[in-house]
Each structure stands twice: as structure tokens, then as C-alpha cells.
Image (spheres, rainbow, N blue to C red):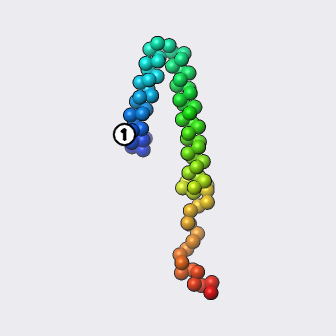
Amino acid sequence: MFDRLGIGGVFGVLLLLAGIGVVASQNLVVAGGIALVIAGLGFVVYGIVRNLVSALGMMGGGGMGGMGGMGGMDDLDDLE
């Protein structure tokens, strides 16, 4: 999982956890609320990216399918 995030993503996750830890040291209820907001935001971003990638045809099951059925330019000569 961490190889997909890259160094910036791993650093961002560590900062998020450290920030929630700082808030939790003062108030556990507020820290729990912040954690839920961050998790919800993550699910929203995941859904948007998944729909966008699907619409562009980069996933296996949905979208327009890319250039899969073209077959090559030689097939156009057969139509003449």
C-alpha cells in the first residue's frame, strides 16, 4: 500500500495521525470527530476518483473501453 502513496503520501498520513494524536491528548471526543471527518473525506475522494477513472476507461469493468476494438488501420482497406 505504501508504495502506491509515495513519500509525500506517507508523510501526509503521518502528519494526519500526529495531528489527531495532539488533539486526542487534550480532548478524545473532538479527536474522534476529526478522525471521522477525515475518514469521510477520504471515502468521498475515493468515490470521485473511481468514477473519474471509470469514465475515462482506465478500469477493466466500466467506461468506454479505450481503443480495444480498433483492430488496426489495415482493416480499413477491406472496406473499399
Residue 11 location in percent, x, y?
Answer: 38, 34
Which quadrant of the structure image shows residue 75? bottom right
Quadrant of the image containing the N terminus: top left
Q: Can you see residue 50? A: yes
Q: Look at the numbered disc 1 and give the secondary structure of its residue.
A: helix
Q: Up-down: is 31 above or below 13?
A: above
Quadrant of the image containing the C terminus: bottom right
Q: Up-down: is 76 above or below 68?
A: below
What's the residue at 59%, 43% (across, down)? 48
Q: How many numbered markers are drawn?
A: 1
Residue 74 location in percent, x, y?
Answer: 54, 81
Q: Specify the amino acid type for callout 1.
A: Ile
Residue 6 location in percent, x, y?
Answer: 39, 42
Q: Which residue is mark 1?
A: 7
Residue 46 in the figure: left or right of residue 17: right
Instruction: Looking at this view, name the residue that lies furthest to the top.
Output: 26
Residue 80 in the figure: left or right of residue 39: right
What's the residue at 46%, 12% (across, down)? 26
Q: Can you see residue 61? A: no
Q: Residues within 10 Å of mark 1 (few under 14, many from 20)?
A: few
What's the residue at 55%, 74% (across, down)? 71
What's the residue at 39%, 38% (across, down)? 8
Instruction: Looking at this view, name the residue that lies furthest to the bottom.
Output: 80
Residue 18 location in percent, x, y?
Answer: 41, 24
Q: Up-down: is 38 above or below 21?
A: below
Which quadrant of the structure image shows residue 64? bottom right
